[in-house]
Image: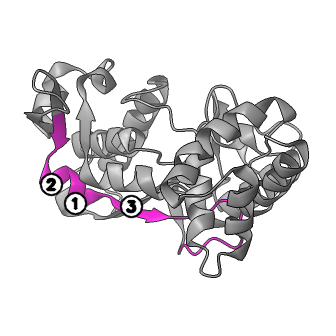
């Protein structure tokens, strides 16, 4: 890919999504957009750049951001967070908490939100509380995957078999010999999947939220954008609410009132 073309793609991607592509990512970008170029019958990357610029309804920009988004995940990834969350949920149940709002802000293909939903179903009495769960991502393709709730066997490597068979049904895989599993209708109905760009403010959500999971995404952003995102999380969290980020992330160097209470877990101060 020509250097100038890469720089222009880089500026568009950073402006629209907050993702900062280094020079080393030039071959990756070229590889990621190659299929889109073929599908559109375009000549090369420069031709595709013109196509993105001339797109009036923004649909091609969504396709571009879908292409460059990294979505590597599996059920119970960084499982210590779900142990912490289990304890939080049990304390809420014992305290007769009546309203629970959860947001998974980087849902990817759905493994993380389904793990969150299973944890809630196991530890809370969802029939007795006002419960809402939103899962968002910038990539429409992975959101569709999550809404369908069908996963290959390898994604379940850290999920106990008893949990898998309780919440998922075995189904035909991509090949004759492959096996896939689909989330039960009851589990799928717990989660609302919607597209949301974390680089566009303010977020169109109604707080207060009790739990926000935003793991393995802010590592792609610069500190200025991370600061804005954390301020939005802080605004939306209820007093005493929790923010979970990944083990490779922290809030060091950012201005925030959120207090660290464990490995990559933060809490908003309570009133009074």
User: Which type of secondary structure does the marked residue at label 3 adopt?
Assistant: strand
CA distance separating discs 2 and 3: 15 Å
Badge number at residue 63: none
Q: Where on the picture, by quarter, is residue 203?
A: bottom right
Between residue 155 and residue 264, name the one nearer to us: 155
Q: Is residue 149 left or right of residue 237?
A: left
Q: Position of residue 161 (x, y in %)?
A: 17, 20
Provide the residue designation for mark 1: 189
Task: Kindly indicate whether the residue at mark 3 contacts the one at mark 2 (C-beta within 8 angstroms).
Answer: no
Instruction: Specify the quadrant that holds the C terminus.
Output: bottom right
The residue that mark 2 highlights is 186
Q: Are marks 1 and 2 in contact (CB under 8 Å)?
A: yes
Residue at point 74% right, 55% down?
13
Q: Nearer the viewer, residue 89 or 200?
A: 200
Disc 1, SS: helix
Queried whether the magenta region covers residue 197, the answer comes back as yes
In the image, the segment drawn in magenta is 181-206
Q: Nearer the viewer, residue 61 or 203?
A: 61
Q: Position of residue 182 (x, y in %)?
A: 17, 41
Circle 2: element type = helix
Which residue, as the protein is rendered here, is positioned at the far bottom?
Answer: 56
Report the mark closest to the observer, 3 or 1: 3
How packed is label 2: few (under 14 Cα within 10 Å), some, or many (20 or more)?
few
Name the residue at 68% across, 58% down: 48
Earlier-in-chain disc, 2 versus 3: 2
Q: Position of residue 232 (x, y in %)?
A: 70, 63
Question: Is residue 260 in view?
Answer: no
Q: Say which residue label 3 marks.
A: 193
Residue at 74% in and 48% down? 19
Q: In the rendered image, is residue 57 in sight?
A: yes
Q: Is residue 132 above or below residue 242?
A: below
């Amino acid at each position: 890919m020509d250097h100038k073309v890469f720089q222009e793609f880089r500026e568009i991607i950073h402006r629209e999504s907050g993702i900062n592509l280094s020079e080393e990512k030039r071959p990756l970008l070229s590889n990621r957009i190659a299929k889109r170029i073929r599908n559109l019958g375009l000549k090369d990357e420069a031709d595709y750049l013109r196509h993105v610029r001339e797109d009036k309804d923004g649909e091609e920009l969504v396709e571009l951001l879908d292409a460059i988004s990294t979505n590597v995940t599996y059920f119970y990834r960084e499982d210590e967070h779900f142990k912490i969350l289990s304890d939080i949920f049990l304390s809420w149940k014992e305290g007769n908490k009546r309203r629970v709002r959860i947001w998974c802000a980087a849902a990817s293909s759905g493994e993380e939100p389904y793990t969150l939903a299973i944890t809630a179903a196991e530890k809370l009495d969802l029939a007795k509380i006002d419960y809402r769960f939103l899962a968002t991502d910038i990539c429409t393709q992975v959101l569709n995957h999550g809404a369908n709730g069908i996963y290959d066997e390898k994604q379940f490597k850290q999920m106990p078999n008893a949990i898998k068979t309780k919440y998922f049904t075995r189904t035909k895989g991509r090949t004759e010999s492959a096996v896939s599993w689909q989330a039960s209708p009851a589990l799928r109905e717990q989660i609302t999947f919607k597209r949301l760009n974390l680089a566009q403010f303010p977020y169109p959500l109604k707080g207060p939220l009790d739990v926000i999971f935003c793991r393995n995404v802010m590592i792609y952003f610069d500190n200025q954008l991370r600061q804005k995102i954390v301020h939005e999380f802080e605004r939306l969290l209820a007093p005493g609410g929790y923010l979970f980020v990944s083990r490779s992330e922290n809030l060091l160097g950012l201005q925030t009132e959120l207090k660290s209470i464990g490995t990559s877990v933060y809490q908003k101060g309570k009133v009074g």
